[in-house]
Image (tube, grey):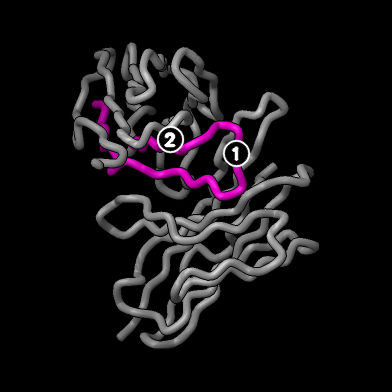
Amino acid sequence: AQKITQTQPGMFVQEKEAVTLDCTYDTSDPSYGLFWYKQPSSGEMIFLIYQGSYDQQNATEGRYSLNFQKARKSANLVISASQLGDSAMYFCAMREVSQGGSEKLVFGKGTKLTVNP
Amino acid sequence: NAGVTQTPKFQVLKTGQSMTLQCAQDMNHEYMSWYRQDPGMGLRLIHYSVGAGITDQGEVPNGYNVSRSTTEDFPLRLLSAAPSQTSVYFCASSYSGAAGPTDTQYFGPGTRLTVL
């Protein structure tokens, strides 16, 4: 079963507008972490934002914020005031921790965001 | 501080050849991992290590070997390359394998491998 689901293969947004990229997850662990990464056309993976399962407030990092709805198991990324440089693939990921304490990062299939001028 | 480095950036192999993808980090991270990225598949975990001398399998380990003799290095070996291993390979590291709440994985620039 897919543990991270990103239902939007592609999204388009006008420059300076806000956009929400969807991510839902599936886990039975009470302690987990959720991440968003950006992958521009150059290929590198850039960490954007993190949300812990016990965090009381939604995470924010500059123009990025994470709309965390724990009961719905969703962790949507909101990008405010989109810029042309935001055009990239965006991946949602969840950290799983095994009983032995080792961690794995499970990725969704990604959403390709295109910012139009 | 170079972060996570990977070599080579590009590689073309013939079926049956062997090679090692190199990964090194200078952040004193305990946890290191290898992923492969295929179109439409996101990133999938191949192998990971929670510290020197300790490795374990991820989601797609077949055809790959790893070892971790030092904290800094985590090479990925393809013993007999197959066309199905054509992919982009990413190495990543993070501070702790015990998953502290603010831990973050940092990725290398990737290696693009083609197997003919």
Q: Where does label 1 land, which residue?
A: B99
Q: Where does label 2 land, which residue?
A: B35
Q: Position of residue A63 (x, y in %)?
A: 45, 76
State whether residue B43 is above or below residue A89: above
Left or right relative to B23: residue A76: right
Left or right relative to B55: residue A26: right
Report the amino acid beneath label 1.
Ala
At x 46%, y 49%, the residue is B40
Left or right relative to A20: residue B4: left
Numbered disc 2: secondary structure: strand
- For label 1, count other residues whose C-alpha is less than 10 Å away and answer few (under 14), some (14-19) or many (20+): many
At x 72%, y 49%, the residue is A26
Precedes in sequence: disc 1 or disc 2: 2
Q: Alpha carbon of mark 1 to alpha carbon of mark 2: how far?
A: 18 Å
Q: Position of residue B35 (x, y in %)?
A: 43, 35
Q: Position of residue B111 (x, y in %)?
A: 27, 36
Q: Is residue B57 magenta?
A: no
Q: Quadrant of residue A104?
A: top right
State whether residue A72 is above or below residue B38: below
Answer yes or no: is residue A61 visible.
Answer: yes
Residue at mark 1 shares a chain with residue at mark 2: yes
**Magenta stretch, residue numbers:** B89-116
